[in-house]
Amino acid sequence: MPTIKDVAAKAGVSTATVSRVINGEKVREETKEKVIKTIKLLGYRPNQIARSLKTQKTHTIGFVVPDYGQFFMQIAKVVEDILNGYGYSLVVCYSDENPDREKARIRMLTEKQVDGMLVVPTSDEDNYIMELNKRGIPVILIDRMVKDIQTDCVLVDNVNGAYQAVEHLITKGYQRIGVINGRQEVTTGEERYRGYLRVFEDYNLPIDRDIIRFGDFSTESGYTLMKELMSLQNPPEAVFIANCYMTIGAMLAIKEMDIKVPEDVAIVGFDDTELTRLSDPPLTAVVQPVREIGEMAANLLYKRICGDMSDYPKMYRLKATLVVRASTDPGWKADIIEKKGA
């Protein structure tokens, strides 16, 4: 098994320099990259117990997510890859969109003496952020922010993402455009709804409250609310659905009701997963920059752990992209047939 001396010899630095890199202390960027590359090459694993006793750090990061679905697990994978390179381990636990469970998970991670925390908040309550700050534990909010509090965040531009989705439907000629949105007490739900409304204002179109529904971001709510919408005497021509789970539920309802997409109703979802791409027809979706979210959150947290607070609080707003597929194009099947016969 390689030792710290082996890493130092291979990288051409002192063992003290290797130790400083492992412990997150300030080292020249060029030297740090060389040491990290050597650690990975040799497969060196430091003695975590000895390090903790010496540095008063556990070299562990906590990540509290609402669920173990694909979106947050993709972010977790990127975060873990980056933090492993800095000598940190990642512990992921979920809140199940429950504020009490979220507080319990944060309390547990605090008791485990994690060196930093990434949190996807389930509500606007900010008590835990203040408590973590008092304890000197850096915290980065991901995907959602907590209103009226200054803290580091890595977010997506939800308003413009939703706007792109609904504007696309309008430009395709759809007029009665419904929405299945998430909880308004979290910023993703509130911002995506704001983007939906803004399109109608900009295009000077009436807003039909009969085809607006609010769920809780779950598959079950997407299923129930799509059934409600499509059972109306005058159902929507198109529906924007504000996350992947509700989109899956909505598609299950549509299949059960024998409704054709996009002939009977066009669908645009927020979030892009294998299921949206493999559905029949493939779904038009707002794609979030998962890798960029994970990279920015991990590097920002490491910066804070190292004591660099120079730009605190830092907020990143990353751009989402609309990917157009067959679920919003009534002529899609005809085009496919025509191409096959050519």
Image (cartoon, helix red, strand yellow):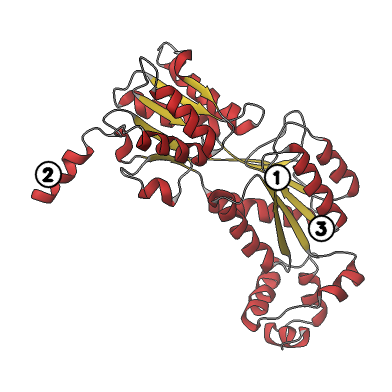
- Residue indicated by mark 2: 338
Pointer 3 residue: 114
- x then y, percent, for residue 101: 76, 43
Query: Badge 3: how crowded within 10 Å, few (<14), some, or many (20+)?
Result: many
211 or 190, which is in the foreground? 211
Q: CA distance from mark 3 to mark 1?
A: 17 Å
Q: Amino acid at mark 3?
A: Val
- Of residues 238 and 251, which is closer to you in this image? 251
Quarter where residue 217 is shown:
top right
Camera-nearest label, 1 or 2: 1
Q: Are marks 1 and 2 in contact (CB under 8 Å)?
A: no
Residue 6 lies in quadrant: bottom right
Which amino acid type corresponds to the residue marked 2 in the rendered image? Glu
Circle 2: element type = helix
What is the number of the mark on residue 95? 1
Image location of residue 279, percent across then percent down: 36, 46
Labels 3, 1: front one: 1
Q: Amino acid at mark 1?
A: Ser
